[in-house]
Image (spheres, rainbow, N blue to C red):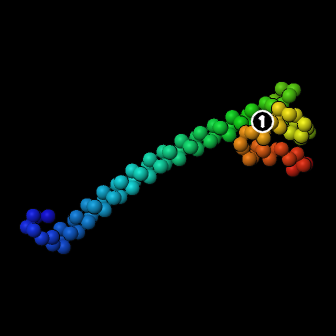
């Protein structure tokens, strides 16, 4: 303001635009923090999922051949207690799907 004790329309508009700019800046900063947190969560989830999937593969690949046949997967998921325990407790729905071998048929 020009400090005359009154706010004219131009001063009002300048004050509103200044407040709006500050609000938009604060919102952009908050979005940046949220985006960074979301990216970190995605990276942690990805690492956890890939680690669980690799562990599952290793548990099923009893012969160490580096590949899994359908029958190897079905047999391990139906009768190998180590595999069943891992899948039951891994917390990954996409891997727990394997606990229902008829779905794999």
Seen from the viewer's position, the closer of residues 90 and 8 is: 90
Q: Residue at x 74, y 32 (%)?
A: 55
Secondary structure beneath dot 1 equals helix
Residue 81 found in image quarter: top right
The residue tagged 1 is: 86
Q: Residues within 10 Å of mark 1 (few under 14, many from 20)?
A: some
Disc count in the image?
A: 1
Answer left or right for 102 relative to 22.
right
Residue 91 found in image quarter: top right
Answer left or right for 71 relative to 55.
right
Quarter that holds the N terminus = bottom left
Q: Residue at x 83, y 44 (%)?
A: 99
Q: Residue at x 78, y 44 (%)?
A: 96
Percent across and percent down for residue 82 are 82, 32
Q: Residue at x 9, y 64 (%)?
A: 3
Q: Residue furthest left?
A: 4
Residue 104 visible, this angle: no
26 versus 51 height, above or below: below
Percent across and percent down for residue 5 are 10, 68
Q: Residue furthest top?
A: 64
Percent across and percent down for residue 25 are 34, 54
Residue 46 visible, this angle: yes
Percent across and percent down for residue 26 are 36, 54
Answer left or right for 66 relative to 12.
right
Answer left or right for 66 relative to 36.
right
Q: Residue furthest bottom?
A: 9
Residue 58 found in image quarter: top right
């Amino acid at each position: 303001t020009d400090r005359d004790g009154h706010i004219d329309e131009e001063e009002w508009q300048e004050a509103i635009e200044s407040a709006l700019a500050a609000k938009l800046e604060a919102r952009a900063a908050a979005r940046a923090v949220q985006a960074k947190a979301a990216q970190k969560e995605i990276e942690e989830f990805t690492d956890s999922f890939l680690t669980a999937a690799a562990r599952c593969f290793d548990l099923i690949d009893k012969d160490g051949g580096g590949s899994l046949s359908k029958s190897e997967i079905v047999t391990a998921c139906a009768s190998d207690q180590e595999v069943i325990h891992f899948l039951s407790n891994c917390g990954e729905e996409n891997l727990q799907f394997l606990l229902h071998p008829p779905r794999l048929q």
